[in-house]
Amino acid sequence: MVAGNILGIRFSRNITLLTGLSSQAWRRAMLLAKKVALVTGSSRGIGRAVALEMAQEGADVVVNYALSEERAKEVAGAIETLGRKALVVKADVSRFDQVEAMRRKIIEEFGGVDILVNNAGVHHHLKSWEIDQTEWNRVLDVNLDGTFFCSRAFSAEMRAKKWGRIINISSIVAFVGTDHEAHYGASKAAVVGLTRSLALELAPYNITVNAISPGLIQTDMTASATDEQRRRELELVPLGRIGQPEDIAYTAVFLASERAGFITGQTIHVNGGEAMF
């Protein structure tokens, strides 16, 4: 029993002081305690922020990359500094054989994943008449095929244990279009359709599947935008700022947690009000 006076308010009740919580109690308080998360393309940008925030909330994290090994190792080091386990795996998600190889490594280390964040993506600022078949295929291969391949591979263990979370990163351009990079817009619109179908297929296994649709976010991928493009887009954002990778990470953590257990097949728009649906 604790009694006293704080800021003029008297209290007398049984309480547990946060400062007195054991490390195990803190672990239970974390949203993703005892979970394993795979975040594709997590060596930088949104993926990096999601990986770190999930680790902050108690998850062990698989850091996937295709090219940036040093950046991936840096992210893994930051995760381990938070007291969580990290596994760095190189894999091109557009190659199903590499996805399967990554799955085997993760099963060996962690026994599977509970949370899959399909974040890996590519885009290039090109007009439709500048996009050849090779360019078209590469963007669709990574953004759409990669999302499907990873969902197909990693839902197996989720189905077996009747619990899982799949979170796909789409884009605002899937809903409002874009005056450049039509292949990117098409791939991200397809991700929304895939999200809904997977949500229906996997619901009987207590697996939720949702998408996040970011607006203008400060990342390496958006760094190629011209000052004029940024100025025009920022004028469309009612909140008056460019989003940060952490804005997406906080949403992903919520969707991965038990608190979002009754949400599936949805797209959460994180865009500062740029588009409202």
Image (cartoon, rainbow, N blue to C red):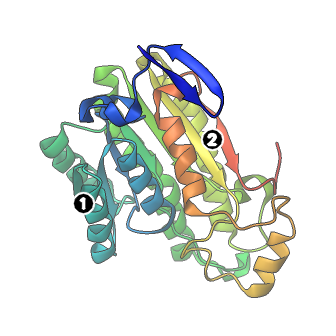
Q: Mark on residue 193?
A: 2
Badge 1: residue crowd in 10 Å (few <14, some 14–19, many ≥20): many
Which quadrant does the C terminus fall into?
A: top right
User: Please, what is the three-letter code of the amino acid marked with disc 1?
Assistant: Val
Label at residue 214: none
**Place of residue 35 in the rendered image (x, y in percent of width and height, measured from the top left):** 31, 36
Q: Residue at x 64, y 25 (%)?
A: 9
Using residue 159 as the reference point, say whether residue 101 is left or right of it. left
Give coordinates of residue 101: x percent, y percent: 21, 53
Above or below, 207 against 41 in this view is above
Q: Spatial distance from mark 1 to mark 2, Cα to Cα?
A: 28 Å
In the rendered view, does 224 fall on the left or right side of 85? right
- Report x, y in % for residue 54: 40, 47
What residue is shown at x 68% (from left), y 81% (from top)?
Answer: 225
Residue at the spot of label 1: 89
Measured along the vertical axis of the image, is residue 73 above or below residue 85? below
Residue 157 in which image quadrant: top left
Circle 2: element type:
helix
For label 2, the crowd category at 10 Å Cα-Cα, with few meaning under 14, some 14 to 19 and many 20 or more, is few
Residue at 33% across, 28% down: 28
